[in-house]
Amino acid sequence: MRFGLKTGAALVAALICLVLGPVRAEAAPDRAAIVNGLCQGGPGLSQAADQLLTGLPGATPDDLAWANRVVGAFAHRQLLCSGDGRGYLASGAAGLDAATLAPVALPADATAPFPSLRARIVLERMEAALALVSPVAPSATLAAIGTLQQHNDSVPPALVSMAIARSHDAQVTKALRRFGVLQGLHAPDTAQRIAAIHDLSRDTTSDALGQLRSLRTDPGYAADPAVAAALDQGIAHVQTWVHVGNVLALLYNGLSAGSILFMSAIGLAVIFGLMGVINLAQGELIMIGAYTAYCVQQVVRAVAPAYISLYPILAIPVVFLVTAAIGIIIEATVIRHLYRRPLMTLLATWGISLLLINLVRVGFGPQNLEFITPSYLTGGVSVVGDFFVTWNHLAAIIFAVLAFLGTLALLRLTSLGLFIRGVTQNRDMAGCIGVSARRIDMLAFGFGAGLAGLAGLAVAPIYNVNPSMGADFIIDSFMVVVLGGVGSLVGTAIAAFGIGLVNVGIEPFYGAVAAKVIALLLIIAIIQWRPEGLIAIKGRR
Amino acid sequence: MNQAPANALSVKNLLVQFGNFTAINNLAFTASYGHVHAVIGPNGAGKTTLLDIFTGRSKARSGSVLLDEKLELTRLSEVQLALAGIGRKFQKPSVFEALTVAENLDLAFRRADRSLLNEVFSRSDRARSDAVDGILQIIGLGTQRHARAGILSHGQKQWLEIGMVLVRQPKVVLLDEPVAGMSDEETEQTAKLVRSLRSPERAIIVVEHDMDFVEQIADLVTVLDQGATLFEGDMKAARTDPRVLDVYIGR
Amino acid sequence: MSGLLNAGRDRAARPVTGLLLLVLVLAPVLGLHAIPGLGLSIYGINLVGQVMCFALLAMALDLMWGGAGVLSLGHGLFFAFGGYLAAMHLLKTAYAQTHVLPDFLQFMGQGAFPGFWWPFGSASLSVLAIILLPGLLAFVFGYVSFRSRVNGVYFSIITQALTYTAMLLMFRNETGFGGNNGMTGFNTIAGLPIGGTKAAVLLTMLSTAAVLVVLVGGRAMLATRFGRMLTAIRDDEARLRFLGYDTLWLKLAAWCLSAVIAAVAGALYVPQVGIINPTLLDPSLSIEVAVWVAVGGRGGLCGAVIGAVLVNTLKFWMSAAAPTVWPFVLALLVLLVVLVLPNGLMDLSNRSRAWMADLTKSDAPGAKNARRLS
């Protein structure tokens, strides 16, 4: 199908070239006629504009400079017209002939015509057309395209082609292409229309799909079987890719929501999953991670403002170390006394979370913090259909994957990981073979706390950062760890992605709250089926 | 002892797996009324797993366990198994520490012919108090009757738990390492206790590491290795059997 | 040690019961200014009533936690459930008198009460609903959780998640119970205008009586065979199961009873504060209830009452006097109790006794006498 479309398009393009060829070869704009039209006003003005637009493709740079000058003068009421319809440009005491730019004496009756409201619209059109082909900033070109589209003006296709040829900016080129296609859709010529339909179907977005579908209702199109066939084919093609894009977008959004969930749960997976400690202050460690990132940002802004965009990278080690240190303090002062009393740990860590929230509230105030988003985290790239990969979400996914791999590597490959697993599986036995359970507990808790801090860094650009933000994470994180299977990092990852996908999938239809409710019910149902979570650590109880 | 005693438990083709690990491999095993049957073997031989199967703590992949040659046990829940007449003393003494010794035994007197609701609302009757008094005599904790179980010594807790198993007259008594952590004197007393429990209405299965203790109490010894029977006979023979020696000394 | 603790608990039972009886008698006397010159403001009476509701809620939690070792961090759910049901009844009553629909229904564009509100026009049906519906919810949730052996901290977390989800649900206007703003605009209760002295005295007496009934009845229940079964579950649930008790039903019975008590507490609470909104479903309220119980000491229901009364009195006083300091005080109180007094204030009394004994022992000659005195 794609092949057919391509050859068809090529054929039609060749046809267009054939038709438009002579127009291209035609000489430069008729300066005298244009000036005459400008001076006449009314219908003459429109004619002048048409002449200018058809003439522009064949214009030399000199022509362009002239046109810009004259139109500019007209816009600023510096084009003086005499009674006989000739135009002059004021240049000091003397004047220039507007058509030839030759110095002449200004006639006595030369006055600047006052552009009426209608004239202003025509003027805008001319200015926009000139902007398309003149060397101006990309933003100005985009604005010009917008103006032309807004008035639904017909612009000679050759003008668009010329603009495309001159464009150096990808975004501008894309906008121009699209503009050209939209022009073509309403062209009187069948071949041109079909070509435009093909061109439009190459843009597989739901936007294009909507435009193509709207053409179906146009009786003029239904009358021509060739156009109708091209249209149906185009719609089918775009539809397929829009579907593909939607599925990919769902997966991507699920992945990014899941990666946020995973980041907030990974610290808990270590602290709760491996150590069996119920840390209700985990959300507050995330909060402190975000606040630490904020502090790093403020310091960089004060010390080296030029490098402000690098602060998230600089913040990674700082955030990890600060939250890990806080975690170690919590472990050493409170948790260590409670390893055999899990329900009391629950209350104690709640007390700690209350303490942390209020300390931060006193220190920073209750308001949301403002974060700078570095330029490399804004925007994104369109992939297929409406599937748009945004850099900030991609960064969150990559961050989560790295955290996952790093934690996995630490636990599986290093001796610290071996000790952590040893101590958490059999505290007494590990003590017997000379592993200092006390130190390992402290390090493991610190590690889990540090991971929570990194989660704070990851969510800082996406969520509201304030002292009570931790509450939003803690329950979701626990659900992820319980669902994934306590003690299994892989299970945590799968569960996070699954819950993320469920949330993203349900949210557009029933809202965020319903998504949460359904996710919770699903978790309770799954726990019925697999009480030990998705990935159970197998063995004798 | 002219006629062969009836089988209380008969295990056939039992297979138990945890993931890829085979804990019990195609095991055949019988326990008879009137006997004390010891199950020994190195760590990981599947001894405790076997008791877990009898009490419903673990589930078998395949095979059958029959009580009195008619009741299939592998599909019953823990509670159903207990009510069917299987009683177990765990390796780690598990008694209700906040309750008194008498209250522990009183709760353990769970009559299989009563629904849970009836049991909840049942008043203390003669049969129950007699049973509790009798067991207190047997396990020698009569003077501690109103003491909280939490303050008993380790050995006393073990005896209390044995008493809790016995009080409702189970058909099969499972004792998982009853003398672990006991002093020599306590072990001696426990051996006496277990020997005194032998009765034609009960089969007793003991899992134990202490060979001298086993020799004192057991009528029959089964040596398990890697989830299968390695040897069956009396303890004297077991001590000289080359395969058994290999398993115990070879590693 | 544990015997000592229980002795401490039992020592507290009589004074607590006596004090509650005193409150029950004094509430009408002081509230209605029966004795000239000796009177309590409506605010004071109301406060006593609210604290009694919290004590009831704390006992409900203690029944499960101290009784069966199952810690719910979601009792706010049942409390709020009872509260919402009571509010529905009060709104129906108000409508019957004023014929003005509650704001939130008008806001949602409803011309009348939704159909399922019909039972709440009747007081007796409402009472039935307050007992049955939370009980049913507890049954379904408890059955599902206990059946799959969700235990210990897992159970605590799942109850917390459930409460949190319920809060999110109730915050939505579309759920139909006033959303963010909740339900308010009550008119009368039992014919007495809400906010008036008589209603306040009545509600305070009802709440105190409920505390008394649950305290005495609950302690009696814990002393029965059923209570011993719960204790056995707390100590070693698996052992009890291997003795032939299906612990699912035992736990479920205690759980449903506990939920109903919490719901009744909520139903008594809402007319006293005159409003219900989803903040009652905030997970931290549910955790706070566990803190009250931990402060007072678990297991005998007395500790729950003492803890709830002390912490809430402190909270009412501090929230007015030094609102920013209160969270710190609460946090430190929690840490203190968890780390130093694992059995709450009961520990304090026992420890102080032990310290006194130590002190007196050190000065040798008088030791024996001093000990006898203590």
Image (cartoon, coloured by chain):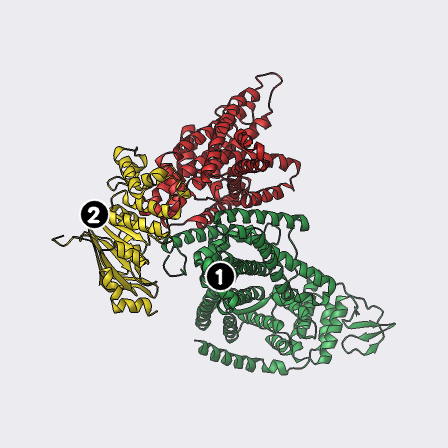
Chain colours: A green, B yellow, C red
Q: Which of the chains bears the disc numbered 2?
A: B
**Which of the 4 image quarters holds residue A125?**
bottom right
According to the picture, the residue beneath numbered tag 2 turns out to be B199
Camera-side residue of C319 and A26: C319
Q: Secondary structure at mark 2?
A: loop
Camera-side residue of C244 and A175: C244
Q: Position of residue C304 (x, y in %)?
A: 50, 36
Residue found at x 26% / y 45%? B83
Camera-side residue of A356 and B1: B1
According to the picture, the residue beneath numbered tag 1 turns out to be A254
Q: Label 1 is placed on what type of residue? A: Gly
Camera-side residue of A427 and C293: A427
Q: Position of residue A531 (x, y in %)?
A: 39, 54
Q: Are marks 2 and 1 on the same chain?
A: no
Q: Residues within 10 Å of mark 1 (few under 14, many from 20)?
A: many
The residue mark sitting in front, 2 or 1, is 2
In the shown orientation, is residue A53 left or right of residue B93?
right
Name the quarter where the C terminus of chain C is drawn: top right
Tags 2 and 1 touching, CB below 8 Å: no
Please say if A398 is above or below B155.
below
Q: CA distance from mark 2 to mark 1?
A: 65 Å
Image mark for residue C154: none
Q: Secondary structure at mark 1?
A: helix
Q: Position of residue A387 (x, y in %)?
A: 51, 66
**Residue C84 visible somewhere in the drawing:** no
Q: Label 2 is placed on what type of residue? A: Ser
Q: Residue furthest left?
A: B2
In the shown orientation, is residue A447 left or right of residue A244?
right
**Which of the 4 image quarters holds residue B223?**
bottom left
Image mark count: 2
Residue found at x 43% / y 34%? C130
